[in-house]
Image (cartoon, rainbow, N blue to C red):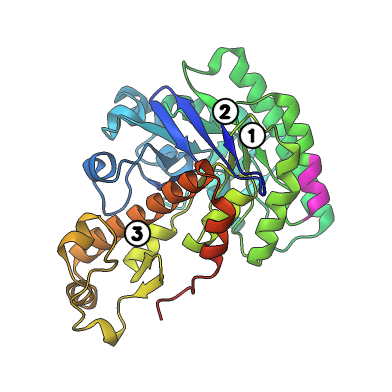
């Protein structure tokens, strides 16, 4: 593992049953066992994605984890030969608000699809992810909204720790399959003392890796960085750290600088569909009239299929016309840009130039000027 002398950044290797992954790594989000707009061939052969994320909540409701198990797990079901991480579904359940009830035993919730009632417990979410066959599984945690009181955040954090202990007890009784890891999740809302306390207790589980959750829930961006800084020193340096649900393209290097190895976010694909395209010079907002007759690609230095073949003018036309092809081409570019950023970060760490890289990234405007 290579480490930056001036920051907490490091470059390592994450070994899974479905391949070794170079870190830092960004994981595209395939919530429903698909990354919207891209085929598995696009992801594996052109973009060289080594690990992607799928969501337990959504796949539990449809098509059902037992069906996925019968189809060979997610790898067989979606024909994906590389690594998969599954979220426990906790974030989605807690975002249901009025449709769920939290107790110390678990969470009772109503499906957003048909209103049927279901129960997630720390043990059952491990079982569901076992059926899905993911390489990295997440414990059930409580993800509080922002803002909340310190008292509520403390109760929520303590519940998350208790649930993590139950999940690991179940996992270690023989529930886990070969090569499946389980990560606990540091919570504590936006209170540094709670983050430190949570991390310190979860380390006792001696997990293969640790996640930092409850980020990107509406808090000011500096607070998100502060919470990573509060938790990270209390997590073992020899284990991977996963910041859940982050971030914007310009934020990725800052999370790595704080010791994060793994990230995921829907932003590159969602923003692509909404007309925001990422480049080293900032975002291109493709609907702007100035691109109507622009013959240049999104990024002249990008080697993705979209940039090799299509102009900003054509992409703007597709976007304005509401054509499906726009989403396909734009998503391909944005995912490639995020993966390129992570490759740039890793290379900068290996060459001992990460502080210089970080300074340069922070100087780039958000939008193309």
| Numbered mark located on residue 114 in the image | none
Viewer-closest of 265 and 348: 348
260 and 67: which is toward the camera: 260
For the question of whether residue 265 can be seen, the reply is yes
Element type at marker 1?
Answer: loop
* Nearer to us in this view, 208 or 173: 208
Q: Residue 187 location, x and y as percent?
A: 70, 46
Pointers 1 and 3 in contact (C-beta within 8 Å): no
Q: Report the residue marked by disc 2.
A: 182
Span shown in magenta: 191-197
27 left or right of 154 in image: left
- Image marks 2 and 1: residues in contact by CB distance under 8 Å: yes
Name the residue at 59% across, 20% down: 171
Left or right for 201, reference 107: right
Residue 319, percent from left and from top: 24, 73
Q: 343 or 55, which lies in front? A: 343
Q: Which residue is mark 3?
A: 334
* Residue 293 magenta: no
For disc 1, the neighbor class at 10 Å (few under 14, some 14 to 19, many from 20) is many
Magenta highlight: main SS = helix
Mark 1 or 3: in front is: 3
Q: CA distance from mark 2 to mark 1?
A: 7 Å
Crowdedness of circle 2 by 10 Å Cα count: few (<14), some, many (20+)?
many
Measured from the top left, where is residue 110 in percent x and y?
A: 52, 48
Element marked by disc 3 = helix
The residue that mark 1 highlights is: 184
């Amino acid at each position: 593992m290579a480490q930056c002398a001036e920051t907490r950044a490091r470059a390592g290797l994450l070994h899974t049953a479905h391949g070794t992954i170079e870190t830092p790594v960004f994981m595209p989000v395939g919530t429903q066992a698909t990354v919207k707009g891209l085929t598995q061939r696009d992801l594996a052969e052109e973009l060289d994605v080594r690990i992607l994320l799928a969501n337990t909540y959504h796949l539990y409701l449809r098509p059902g984890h037992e069906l996925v198990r019968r189809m060979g797990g997610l790898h067989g079901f979606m024909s994906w030969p590389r690594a998969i991480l599954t979220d426990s579904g906790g974030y989605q359940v807690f975002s249901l608000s009025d449709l769920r009830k939290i107790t110390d035993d678990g969470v009772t919730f109503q499906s957003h699809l048909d209103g049927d009632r279901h129960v997630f417990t720390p043990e059952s979410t491990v079982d569901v992810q076992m059926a899905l066959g993911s390489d990295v599984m997440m414990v059930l945690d409580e993800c509080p909204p922002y803002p909340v009181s310190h008292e509520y955040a403390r109760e929520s954090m303590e519940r998350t720790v208790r649930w993590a202990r139950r999940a690991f007890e179940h996992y270690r009784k023989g529930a886990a399959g070969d090569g499946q890891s389980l990560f606990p999740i540091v919570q504590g809302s936006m209170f540094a003392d709670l983050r430190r306390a949570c991390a310190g207790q979860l380390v006792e589980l001696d997990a293969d890796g640790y996640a930092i959750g409850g980020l990107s829930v509406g808090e000011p961006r500096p607070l998100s960085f502060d919470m990573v800084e509060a938790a990270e020193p209390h997590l073992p340096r020899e284990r991977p750290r996963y910041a859940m649900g982050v971030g914007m393209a310009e934020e990725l290097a800052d999370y790595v600088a704080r010791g994060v190895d793994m990230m995921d976010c829907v932003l590159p694909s969602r923003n692509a569909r909404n007309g925001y395209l990422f480049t080293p010079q900032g975002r291109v907002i493709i609907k702007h009239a100035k691109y109507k007759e622009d013959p240049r690609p999104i990024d002249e230095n990008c080697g993705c299929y979209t940039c090799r073949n299509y102009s900003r003018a054509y992409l703007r036309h597709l976007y304005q016309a509401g054509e499906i092809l726009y989403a396909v081409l734009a998503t391909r570019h944005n995912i490639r840009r995020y993966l390129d950023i992570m490759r740039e970060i890793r290379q900068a760490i290996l060459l001992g130039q990460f502080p210089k890289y970080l300074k340069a990234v922070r100087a780039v405007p958000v939008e193309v000027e």
